[in-house]
Amino acid sequence: MTIEANNEEQRQEYRLSVSEAVYIELEAGQDDATARILLSRSTDLSANGLQVVVDRPLPEGNIYPLCIQLYSPPARYVLTGEVKWCRPSGGRYLIGIALFESDDTAIVGWKEEIARRLTQA
């Protein structure tokens, strides 16, 4: 895990360069068996957003439920995010996602976890 300062991008915060599982709910279903979920991997994480690699483009401006599964220590955060940008990268796509502040998500715990990781790095 490395920490990078933001010199070129729009985010105004530190980010962690780490690969974690990110599940993006493309379409809700009547139950878990019928929901359409896209599995992606993070390339970096911050308190207010993340960058992921996916195998298909997602439209800018779309809002999706997300589940970020951290490996060590193991933790799961259910969040909501908006696709801010999408660009091709080596046959796949890099997507920037801004996280929403919402009482219905684990955003407070997420921000606490990112802060904890930043202080330990």
Image (cartoon, rainbow, N blue to C red):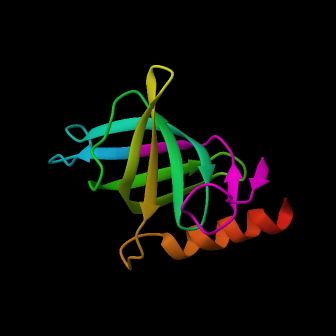
Q: Residue 18, image x and y in percent? A: 68, 45
Task: Identify which residue is drawn at 78% across, 47% down.
Answer: 1
Work out whether 88 lies above or below 62: above
Reply yes or no: does residue 59 show up in magenta.
Answer: no
From the viewer's perspective, is 88 left or right of 113?
A: left
Seen in the picture, residue 16 relative to 115 is either above or below; the reply is: above
Q: Is residue 57 left or right of residue 40?
A: left
The x, y position of residue 10, in whole percent, is 54, 62
Judged by its main secondary structure, the magenta piece is loop
Viewer-proximal residue among 94 and 63: 94
| Image quadrant in which you'd find residue 93 | top left
Q: Position of residue 34 (x, y in %)?
A: 19, 38
For the magenta stretch, what is the residue range? Answer: 1-23
Q: Quadrant of the C terminus?
A: bottom right
Residue 22 counted in the magenta span:
yes
Count of numbered circles in the view: 0
Residue 64 picture location, percent across and down: 31, 54
Viewer-side residue, 58 vs 85 = 85
80 over 37 or under it: above or below: below
Q: Residue at x 37, y 45 (%)?
A: 24
Q: Residue furthest top?
A: 91
Q: Can you tell which quarter of the image residue 63 is in?
A: bottom left
Please state if 38 lies on the left or on the right of 118 as rendered.
left
- Which residue is located at x 38 percent, y 80 percent? 103
Say above or below: 72 vs 37.
below
Residue drawn at x 53%, y 67% as measured from the top left: 48
